[in-house]
Amino acid sequence: MAGAATKMEDMEYLQVNERLKAAFPRFSPQLRKAARHVLDHPEEVALNSMRQLARQAGVHPSTMVRLAKTLDLSGYDALREPYRQHLRDGPARYAARARGLQALDDGKSALLDELLALDIDNLQVTARGIGADRLIRASRILAGARRIYVVGSRSSFSIAYYFHYACRMFRDTVHLIEGTGGAFADGIRGIGRKDALLAVGFEPYARETVLAARFGRGQGAAVVAITDSAVSPIGIDAAEALIVANRSPSLFQSLAGALAAAQALVALLVARGGREAVAALENSESQLERFGAYWPATGAEARVPS
């Protein structure tokens, strides 16, 4: 079994659980006690040291090491890692994610280091995974649409709003489906086969976003999805699915990759928008200046309300 240890370090949470269950009848009483605690309290495995977990399980710390060895793992840290990964990436367990944040917060920089490192990794993985060709195809779908509808609910709303806000600077046929006052269905009612829908959503998928994507497809519109899986409810039948990495130990999945994808789409739409896009941007800038939307640049005189 020693040779098996080379890749067993990469086991996922569910694989560890299944192997523990399969081996459980052959375990000694102490190993059974340890395995039962691991299976029943996965969050504790992710968040606690070997000694803490052993104390909670009522076994000697060395029993935890022996339990890891039964799975051909190098030690307790290798056993804990799939549970830590599951806690980071699992959907909707907000209280569990909060406990994970507290466990990482050592009063120094461990939490911030992990947050920043994962976001950098998310951007790199997203860039490699999507690639220029897929982004260009998605931008062509959106550029060629009569109207672009945009939807993203809950934590994904910020990405949808950014795309809508930026595009409205140079194109007035972009519509954000907000659902204010419960009128969500009204916002997508007119979508048709000449239109496109940009849908943004990650596990756990917001019901409204899934329904909007399905309705849009049913009406013949081309759906471009920014999501976390090719088989997500909004990505599986999309004309183009932009799969972004979103790992994070924080309360919600990281939005760094999704924002990068949305920014790239906006840039491509401007680039292929020609003179009309430039003229529309000039008009938008002029209108914003008339309303005094922005604080004056350094050196310019500003009127300060008395």
Image (cartoon, helix red, strand yellow):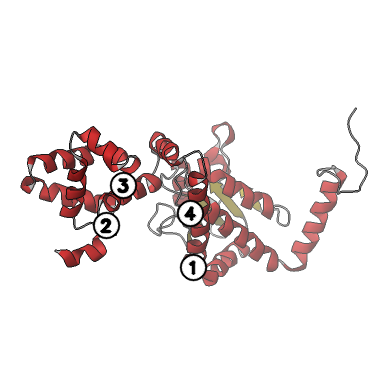
Q: How busy is the neighbourhood of tag 2: few (under 14 within 10 Å), some, or many (20 plus)?
A: some
**Precedes in sequence: disc 4 or disc 1:** 4
Which quadrant, please, contains the C terminus?
top right
Q: On the image, numbered disc 2 is attached to which residue?
A: 11
- Using the numbered discs, state the Cα–Cα distance from disc 4 to disc 3 in whole angstroms: 17 Å
Secondary structure beneath dot 4 equals helix
Residue that appears at 81% across and 43% down: 293
Give percent across and percent down for residue 253: 47, 47
Mark 4 to mark 2 CA distance (whole Å) = 20 Å
Query: Quick check: marks 4 and 3 in contact, CB under 8 Å?
Result: no
Q: Amino acid at mark 1?
A: Arg
What mark, if any, has residue 128 been given in the picture? 1
Label 2 – label 3 distance at C-alpha: 10 Å
Kindly identify the residue that appears in the image at 45 percent across and 39 percent down: 101
> Which of the two residues, 201 or 186, is positioned nearer the viewer here?
201
Amino acid on which disc 3 is placed: Tyr
Query: Which corner quadrant of the image does residue 1 belong to?
Result: bottom left
Q: Secondary structure at mark 3?
A: helix
Tag 2: amino acid: Met
Q: Earlier in the sequence, mark 4 or mark 3?
A: 3
Look at 91% across and 37% down and name the residue there: 303
In the image, residue 24 lies at what x, y percent?
11, 46
Q: Position of residue 39 (x, y in %)?
A: 21, 41
Measured Cα–Cα span from mark 4 to mark 1 = 15 Å
Task: Determine crowd level at label 4: few under 14, some 14-19, many 20+ residues with C-alpha closer than 10 A.
Answer: some
Q: Secondary structure at mark 1?
A: helix
State which tag comes first along the sequence, 3 or 1. Answer: 3
Residue that carries the numbered disc 3 in the rendered image: 83
- Which badge, 1 or 2, is on the more N-terminal residue? 2
Camera-near label (4 vs 1) is 4
Residue on which disc 4 sits: 118
- Going from the N terminus, do you reach mark 2 or mark 3 first? 2
